[in-house]
Image (tube, rainbow, N blue to C red):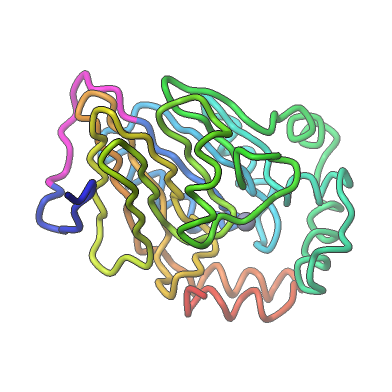
Amino acid sequence: MACWTESARSCAPPSRGSRIRYAVVSDIHGNHEALSAVLADADRAGARALLCLGDMVGYGADPVACAEAVGERAVAVVAGNHEHAALGLMSLRWFNPVAREAALWTRERLSDGLRGYLSALPLTATVEDATLVHASPRSPEEWEYLMSPDDGFEVFADFGTRLCFVGHSHRPGVWSLGSSGREHAAWFRAWPVQVRLEVGRRYVINVGSVGQPRDRDPRAAYALWDLEERLVSLRRVEYDHRGAAARILAAGLPRALADRLGSGF
Ligand code: ZN
């Protein structure tokens, strides 16, 4: 029995009402064009609150605007490895040369106030019955990637809530565990992806990346979480990726960071 359905038709735009609906974003990476498009889409969909899984900065040309926009709106934010890199809280030894250059460029642009805000972000947070973490609920500070089916199923013992929202890989995916077995899905082709939260099952959900998708779809990715309907909807939003790429080049950041926005990989 599938725990999600993929159907563009099944996702009628949610009406504005009293439902508690969160927008869950991750890996914005200084892409203000993508973030603006996602926030507008979330507003239209009736999202009441914003949750952010980190990596607001790094790679893109607008780290400050992105971090400030999230800081103003989000009810919960956790730090990603790119926040820690920009703050000098972790070694850049494991970053590839392009990521390292972007981290150092970003570091120079953070005001003292923004550094203070980013430094205070926790590595995990709990909202309703969901854990928020950038990479993995198992040793969050080690920034492990949940990529394969096994990667996700191995971390269910590392969080106590029903749901765990993650980012980091920049690839939307769903792991679900319950008495009727395990289910995993990724590399979706039809959007939005509706994840119906079934009683007795737990979920790890990667919401994908707002600002630098890596699943061969250049559209911004994020999720809507509707508590009343017990539904997580993984969504894609068109945005001006050419404009974001032009700003990366104009900022003097590596060309590879601009080029990959058009391919979504
Ligand atoms: Zn990232």
Q: Is residue 101 left or right of residue 189?
A: right
Q: Please name whichever residue, 265 or 195, is drawn nearer the observer in this view of the structure.
A: 195
What residue is at 86 percent from the left and 53 percent from the top?
A: 108
Judged left or right of residue 44, residue 264 is right
Can you give x and y, in whole percent of width and height, for residue 220 in the image? 43, 60
Q: Can residue 16 be found in the magenta stretch?
A: yes
Q: Please name the residue shown 34% across and 59% down the image.
A: 185
In the depicted structure, whether residue 249 falls above or below residue 205: below
Q: Is 208 above or below relative to 112?
A: below
Corner quadrant of residue 212: bottom right
Q: Position of residue 54 (x, y in %)?
A: 62, 43
Q: Is residue 23 above or below residue 108?
A: above
Q: How many marks?
A: 0
Q: Which residue is more in the foreground, 168 or 112?
A: 168
For residue 215: magenta?
A: no
Magenta residues, start to end: 12-21
Q: Nearer the viewer, residue 40 or 137?
A: 137
The quarter of the picture showing ligand 1: bottom right
Snapshot quadrant of residue 197: top left
Residue 155, given in percent of the width and then of the height, sits at 55, 42
Q: Main secondary structure of the magenta part?
A: loop
Q: Percent from the top left, x then y, of residue 240?
A: 44, 67
Please report the residue visible at 63 percent of the width from the left and 38 percent of the height from the top.
Answer: 68
Asked if 255 appears above or below 219 in the picture, the reply is below
